[in-house]
């Protein structure tokens, strides 16, 4: 039987075509990504009918290459996991160094003076609120840079996986229609919370559909906010409240008094520790997402090979031809959708 899955035939998606422009964009993204896969699948079944010997040779090559493919994949996975560990440590180091500088009493005094606020309760509370925003933005900026790094490394892993599975067909007249990026991206989309792999997910069609379904455009600040909200949102609110409580008009050298109060509140309520816990959670999410994507990639490849073997070894040519007719009907359906 054909391995190609066409979720667009479900009533819910057919209804979504007429709901609104947002749904139409999602449908268009899905079709644009699915149509090439459908055509490749169609070509494969037509090829199996006419060139069974080539596909039998392909299965032989896949089996010969499998051990070296697995070994290379395991090595690449270790590299990604090692990098996640390194970036976790580096993120916390960069953040704690930044906090140590910004919460230095003399530095705070200079910053308060530079802000030109007055010795008024409202002014002081507003300054504290802006300081908290700067701290959170800095923490997010550190993670954003590192997210680019781990996403690039993950893309290398997925590309290497694709190259290794394609190697079996290098000297044959058939292609391997296995899309590793699609499989990995779809696994991340299903997971939802992906930590530092959000940049990688956003680069895939399945990721574009996922973020679009949340009403988030790629390349916007909302995208990054969605990636960090689960680890820093509560800390920001709590920190702002804790710092605001007790902020009043001070006498004498009031700037220094305010600076000391801010530093004391951070220390008393372990705000820095809470941010570091958030950073740990972010990288835990990243590690879980990568492991889930890698696991799904291996499973999907095994399923692909098994399905190919069953199809090639099948003596029911009529069933293969029925699959060809079914895929052609689906191609016509996509070509005639008005979006």
Image (spheres, rainbow, N blue to C red):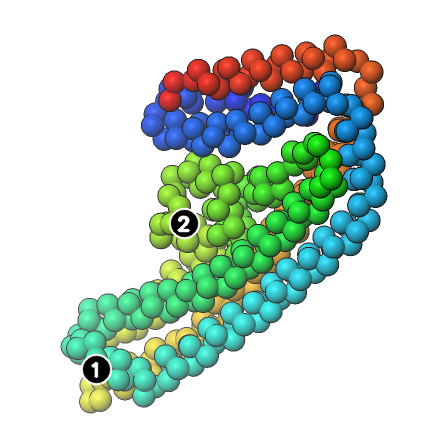
Give the mark count: 2
Using a 10 Å C-alpha cutoff, classify the residue at mark 2 as few (fewer than 14 neighbours), some (14 to 19) or many (20 or more): some
User: Whole-percent x and y of residue 111?
Assistant: 26, 80
Q: Which mark is residue 223?
A: 2
**127 lies left or right of 241:** left
Q: Secondary structure at mark 2?
A: helix
The picture places residue 10, in percent across and down from the top left corner, at: 53, 19
Q: Is residue 245 visible?
A: no
Give the quadrant of residue 178: top right
Residue at left 36%, top 31%? 22
Residue identified by numbered label 1:
113
Going 45% across and 71% down the picture, which residue do you hit?
271
Q: Is residue 214 above or below residue 141?
A: above
Along the line of sight, the residue nearer the viewer: 197 or 93: 197
Is residue 8 among what the camera can see? yes
Q: Residue at x 58, y 29 (%)?
A: 37
Q: Position of residue 207 (x, y in %)?
A: 49, 42
Check if mark 1's residue and mark 2's residue have beta carbons within 8 Å. Answer: no
Query: Which mark's residue is nearer the viewer, 1 or 2?
Result: 2
Q: CA distance from mark 1 to mark 2?
A: 35 Å
Q: Residues within 10 Å of mark 1 (few under 14, many from 20)?
A: few
Of the 4 image quadrants, the one containing the N terminus is top right
User: Which numbered disc flags the more N-terminal residue, 1 or 2?
Assistant: 1
Q: Closest to the observer: 203 or 115?
A: 203
Comparing 231 with 172, the one in front is: 172
Report helix, strand or loop for mark 1.
helix
Query: For residue 319, what is the image quadrant?
Result: top right
Q: Quadrant of the C terminus?
A: top left
Labelled disc at residue 219: none
Residue at 71% across, 41% down? 170
């Amino acid at each position: 039987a054909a391995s190609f899955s066409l979720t667009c035939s479900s009533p819910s998606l057919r209804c979504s075509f007429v709901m609104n422009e947002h749904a139409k964009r999602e449908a268009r993204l899905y079709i644009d990504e699915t149509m090439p896969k459908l055509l490749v699948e169609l070509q494969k079944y037509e090829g199996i009918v006419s060139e069974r010997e080539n596909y039998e040779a392909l299965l032989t090559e896949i089996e010969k290459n499998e051990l070296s493919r697995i070994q290379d994949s395991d090595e690449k996975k270790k590299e990604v996991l090692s990098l996640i560990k390194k970036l976790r440590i580096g993120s916390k180091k960069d953040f704690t160094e930044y906090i140590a500088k910004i919460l230095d009493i003399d530095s705070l005094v200079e910053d308060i003076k530079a802000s030109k606020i007055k010795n008024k309760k409202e002014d002081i509370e507003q300054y504290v609120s802006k300081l908290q925003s700067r701290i959170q933005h800095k923490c997010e900026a550190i993670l954003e840079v590192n997210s680019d790094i781990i996403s690039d490394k993950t893309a290398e892993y997925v590309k290497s996986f694709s190259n290794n599975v394609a190697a079996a067909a290098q000297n044959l007249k058939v292609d391997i229609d296995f899309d590793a990026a699609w499989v990995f991206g779809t696994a991340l989309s299903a997971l939802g919370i992906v930590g530092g792999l959000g940049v990688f997910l956003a680069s895939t069609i399945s990721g574009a559909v996922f973020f679009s379904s949340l009403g988030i455009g790629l390349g916007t600040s909302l995208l990054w906010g969605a990636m960090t909200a689960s680890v820093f949102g509560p800390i920001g609110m709590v920190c702002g409240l804790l710092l605001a409580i007790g902020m009043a008009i001070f006498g004498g050298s009031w700037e220094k008094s305010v600076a000391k109060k801010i530093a004391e509140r951070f220390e008393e309520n372990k705000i820095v520790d809470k941010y570091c816990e958030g950073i740990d959670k972010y990288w835990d999410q990243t590690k879980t997402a990568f492991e889930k994507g890698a696991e799904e990639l291996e499973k999907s490849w095994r399923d692909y090979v098994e399905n190919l073997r069953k199809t090639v070894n099948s003596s029911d040519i009529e069933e293969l031809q029925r699959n060809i007719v079914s895929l052609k009907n689906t191609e016509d359906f996509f070509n005639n959708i008005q979006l």
